[in-house]
Amino acid sequence: MKNTVLKVEDLHVSFKTQTGKITAVRGVNFELKKGETLAIVGESGSGKSVTAKSIMRLLPKSTTEITKGDILYDDKSLLKLSNKQITDIRGSEISMVFQDPMTSLNPTMKVGKQIMEGLQRHQSMSKAQARERALEMLKLVGIPKAEMRLDNYPHQFSGGMRQRVVIALALACNPKVLIADEPTTALDVTIQAQILDLMKDLQKKTDTAIILITHDLGVVANMADRVAVMYGGKIVEQGTLDEIFYNPQHPYTLGLLQSMPKMNEDRSQPLLPIAGSPPNLATLGEGCAFAARCPHAMKVCHTYTPRDTVVGNDHHTAACWLQDPRASKTETEEVLVVN
Amino acid sequence: MGRKIRIQALMILMAFVLILSGCNFNSSESSSEGSGDKEGDTKSAGQVLNISATADIPTLDSTKAHDGVAFTVLNNVNEGLYRQDENHQPIEALVTEHTENEDQTVHTFKLRESKWSNGDPVTAQDFEYAWKRVMKDASPYNFMFVTASIKNAEAIMNGEKDAAELGVKAVDEQTLEVTLESANPLLQSLLTFPTFLPQNQKFVEEQGDQYALEAENILFNGPFKLVEWTHDQGWKYEKNADYWDAEAVKLDTINAYVVKDPATGVNLYETNKVDRIDLSSESVDQFKNDPNFDTILEPSMIFLRFNHTHPVLGNKNIRQAINMAIDKESLTDVILKDGSTALNGVVPKGFFQSPEGKDYRELNGDFNTGTVEEAQKLWEAGLKETGASDVAVSINISDSEDHKKVAEYLQAQLEDNLPGFKLEIKAVPFAQRLEIEKAIDYDLSLSSWGPDYSDPMTYLDMWVKGGSANRMDYHNPKLDELVTQARTETDLSKRYEMLLNIEKILLEEDAAIVPLYQDGTSILMREKIKDLIVHPTGASHSYKWASIEE
Amino acid sequence: MKRYFVQRIGYMLITLFIIVTATFFLMQLLPGTPFTNPEKLTAQQLTVLNAKYGLDQPVAIQYIRYLGNLVQGDLGYSFQHEGRTVSSMISTRIGPSAFIGLQALVIGAILGLVLGIISALKHNSIFDYGSVALAVIGMSIPSFVFAALLQYYVGVKLEWLPVALWEGYSSTLLPSIALSVTVTATVARFIRSEMLEVLGQDYVITARAKGMKENQVIVKHVVRNALIPVVTMLGPLAVSIMTGTLVIEKIFSVPGLGEQFTLSILVLDYSVIMGITIFYSALFIFVVFVVDIIYGFLDPRINYKGESA
Amino acid sequence: MKEFDAKLPVHRDIQTQNDYIPDDIPSDLFVKAPLDQKKSEEISTPSMSFWQEAFQRLTKNKGAMISLVLLLLLIVMALIGPSMNEFTYREQNLAHSNMPPKVAGLEWMGFDGIDANGVNQYAERDVATNYWFGTDEFGRDLWTRVWKGTQISLFIALVAAALDLVIGVIYGGISSFYGGRVDNVMQRIIEVLMGIPNLIVIILFILVLEPGIRSIILAMIITGWVGMARVVRGQVLQLKGQEFVLASRTLGASNGRLIWKHLMPNVMGPVIVTVMFTIPTAIFFEAFLSFIGLGLQAPLASLGVLIEDGYKSMRYFPYKLIYPALVISIIMICFNLLADGLRDALDPKMKK
């Protein structure tokens, strides 16, 4: 059995705003094992990125607060580390790739320098060594004429190439965990595939664990070992790729799957979008966050928050009242039948 | 090249520019630069006077100089035939002996031996050269030669004769012969004027058009030498050891600082940077009880011109009414506060005495004084005569502080006291005001007039028809005739009588202008300064006899 | 790039030409003679003077002559200061102005940077509000009011610094400080908003995610990127300093160009007004040009085609 | 996260509620009850127009609101201040010249009628009337003159800004709307004008024109409109490419309709902000011109004229400088803060 590198326990994160406190992440639990890829899926605003940034402790202290829970990396709590200790871990143990390669590189610094910075910081390399390694990384992520490109500025690269640079930057110090926050959303479809292949490829070489944050189930299908579905700041369903895709237990997961076109199925089957819009975290009261949009919602769903329930084997869990034995069988079956 | 290096290079460049421009500092102040004690040292080491000047010297070329600042400097660094003494009377300077012919038209001056600062002797030729130069270049003050009645001066000015024919001749090195058109009792007094100073021909020609534009481009033969002159900042005099009367000179150094803003002047005085400043009326209240405060009455007069062709202002009653409607005493005592005094005549008081020793003003008394009620009666009468019901006119003023204030005051006085009178103020730069006056393109104009020489005539002959200073279409043949007669009258008492009558015609008969006040200056001067002489005409200051008493 | 420069310089020359022409003909509209002592000037003297300054020629000829001389760097003679050329007056006067101007720029830039950076880093703190308030006040209070107060309290009351005049380095301080207030305020405001913007940029998070220490992130990534646009402020700042010198130099008796300009305006010394106007305009145009070049030099995204990638 | 509606209650301790899951949930709650979608839509933030939203943002900006109130107060004072006592701005009374400020009841604040030498001028000269801001050397009431000056300064600034606006909007609008060669030519003209330091131009024009309010306004708009024209042009160019304009065009909207219905409302934001920044600049220029001696004709007073007068006698009569300087500073600060606030409210992207 693979050992766990990262464990998130009952994470709660809230934001201070002018109108009050808003809890964006409300009890997230998951584990990440060495070398595996965990995809966190959900609509925008579901708390995916906040969770990711909490792990890196990149949320601005002045406006955010981790109110509860813990994040364990190699069994150490990341939340209890001093600023210095966490900066030591950032980039060397855990790195991150961001959504928009257009803005995630400093426009006035040569890309080589940007890669070297991290190396010099964490691996106390000399300038020459760092440059050597940066060059190696650029080659590794498939940037042609890498020697020349080291001294280019970000605006001289195309979007895809920039994302390769960002990945090179993230992987330069051989981190154990890579958090990729929608790494392909801003890219052309053709480039997306290349980047994903690159990441898979590199993962094999480096044995890095990846947290892939995305709203694109296609990307998930392509990359993930396990999947966590987030809604309204909570993980509503979690399981292996197959469990989630072929045996979804939460109506939201189901909705997501139904709204995704499938290549190999009957084209005549209509896509079923999820009605309504994502919840407003500020006004979210008791009950299941999805209840307002859930076609199977019961009275209980509006009043009490459902617990994580293990469904089927192993670690496949779902937080839904339909899993409760008291829920009428017909309701539960209805969900399953549709799939 | 790394970006960092480039930024550094940029910074260095900037610092360099800063240092470079720093080199432009006033080098002349090297002596007084730095600590205050050092200054104190120099003060106790010798007689040092620190004064302020209101402007830079435009030029020190005596033939071209035309402003008070330059005249003062010239008066203290050069020596002519005569200079004004403590009582503003002409005393012999370079002249040791003055002889004249019977009809007082040919004057011979014997010169004492003296030296220019380059070692050359000062000769009679230097005078001849300088005087002819004034005429040749049609210099600003060439009319002084006409006033002095020097032969052919008027013809040269009118382009009828050549400058070489001016009535001045160097008989030998030490003898100067001056020929006049007619006898002139004022000759000696006029010769104290800086335009009559000598110039060393060789030196002037060497310097070409740079002559007298810097301290090193001019020669001195007076009580002081100008050792430094930093444009727009100041200049420094030092005692001239080669001056013929060097023993009389007590000061060793005079530092003059250009201070254009009177408020700044006060600050400099209070911080002991300068020992003498002119005060603006705003500061008078603050210092009027200070022992160092003083006011100086000057011979210049401020008055209202009228456009005599104006349908309403052309009326004498109206003009008289305006004169009486103005409370001149309040103007000088409350608004100006600088020692100015109300004036009810053209010739200022305290400067011009009759041959019998009586002041002109005393002899002629006040004109057109009266109460507001009288003014209003005259006003009504005037309006009836002109058929006007209300009068909306504008007053043309130059935009100096004092004139603006006076105009504001006049506006309120006239509009309040004369029913139906509307006065609009039009402030323009000085030169523009003159232009408007010369074109007689105004209704009322606030003007000033200062004397060119020490005689009432300087205020009286300006009103003749076509005179360049008339500027208001005023004409009275009687006045013109009297002026002509007075010019040639040699009997001084008779002449003075004529002069008194001219003013009567102008004011009693015609009420042609409204005299407002006689200008005064308020100053702050430390008590330790003694014998700094301020002259009412010509060059305004003499430092020759001044001293510091600690 | 070469083409860009040629084009830019072309525009600069056209602008300058228009300014020269407009100034020249505006001056023709000014009433009054520019000569000193006009009170007692006779007709004959006027003719002599007019001939000397070429004012007896038709305006068109005067204009062409002026342009011709201008090309050779000759701005003519002052009417008020006989025998002194306008160019020599400008060259002796520019030193003090440049010195206090640059010093004010340096003081203002440093203070402004410090205030702006700290207030952005301590966003929404008391310090931030304080420096924003300071900046607004600095921008709002007219410089001459401030200068008068400085002169009185620091110069007269406390006697810490010379009240006025131009003697040695210490006398440059008060005018520079008075001038630097607007600069400080403008720079601080600008820097603060730039910093806040940069702080919100993704690449700052990238830098943090790389594990860079916070001060490295601030210095290398935030401040540097926030500083680059500050260069674009040099143009407006140059103008505000130029404007400031017009009154500040008068108050402190600094023998600078601004003082000469206001003086010449009051006595209608055409040639000097024109000369200084042209000089100021040329300087301004040049500063804007230099700023553009420096900006391109600092920001790799600019290529001299006027577009950013 | 600024757009939450303040009216809806916020659940502050959501997590404790969420954690509370009673074991004895009654079974009858397990009944199907999906929410009506329309209803759930209603719960989400109600839609607000751009202007409402901007206004709400503005009201949250304390500095801007205080400035707005202060400005309104100053404007009211500028209008009614001169008639609050019996004096006029031009009425002279030399017997009462240079009276220090005195307000009955406010003696402790320095309004005690005592001059710099510690003499109570009111007792000394036996003056019964209280001059709230004192008098000048002509004995004119400074209270009246300060508010009259405020009136004139504001008038000059507002008119100049309004004319800048009109010219700038027309010029910038035409230039950007027609584009192509027209735009090219008009842009070159602007580029040339931008190259001229505007204060110099203002000074030159004032010299040539007859001094007065009209000349000052005219001189200020000669260069002032350029900035506005650039803002308008930039804004229109940006909008022109956007879908809704293209859509409207495809639907056959006339140019007039396009300009008035689509472009204008969207250009208004930056334009208002620019105007708000123009006003303090104009006030400053006016004061500046007065200070170098190119101001208004007496006895009219603007704040600049009063400050210049006050500056000259600040040593002995500090009150002559303090009140007009205070008023001009407050006006400048308030306009700047209000403009800042408006910029943040109307166009958060617009910098500088």
Image (tube, rainbow, N blue to C red):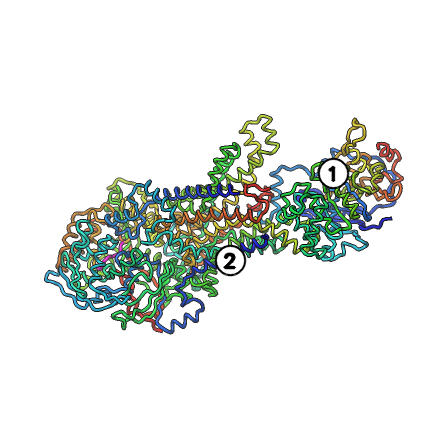
Q: Chain of mark 1?
A: A
Checking the image for residue B15, the label placed there is: 2
B125 w.r.t. A202: above or below: below
User: At numbered mark 2, what does the secondary structure look like: helix, strand or loop?
Assistant: helix
Q: Position of residue A316 (x, y in %)?
A: 85, 42
Task: Quote the CA–CA distance across marks 1 and 2.
Answer: 54 Å
The prevailing secondary structure element of the residues shown in magenta is loop
Q: Chain of mark 2?
A: B
Badge 1 crowding class, 10 Å Cα cut-off, few under 14, some 14 to 19, many 20 or more, is some
Camera-side mark, 1 or 2: 1
Q: Position of residue D310 (x, y in %)?
A: 43, 55
Q: As drawn, is C89 to the left or to the right of A3?
A: left
Q: Nearer the viewer, residue D135 or D183?
A: D183
Q: Amino acid at mark 2?
A: Ala
Q: As drawn, is D193 to the left or to the right of A125?
A: left
Residue B450 part of the magenta segment = yes
Residue D250 part of the magenta segment = no
| Span colored in magenta | B449-454
Q: Quadrant of residue A145?
A: top right
Badge 2 crowding class, 10 Å Cα cut-off, few under 14, some 14 to 19, many 20 or more, is some
How many badges with numbers are in the image? 2
Which residue lies under the disc numbered 1?
A193
Q: Could you tell me if residue C194 is visible in this image? A: yes
User: At numbered mark 1, what does the secondary structure look like: helix, strand or loop?
Assistant: helix
Q: Could you tell me if residue C200 is visible in this image? A: no
Q: Marks 2 and 1: in contact by CB < 8 Å?
A: no
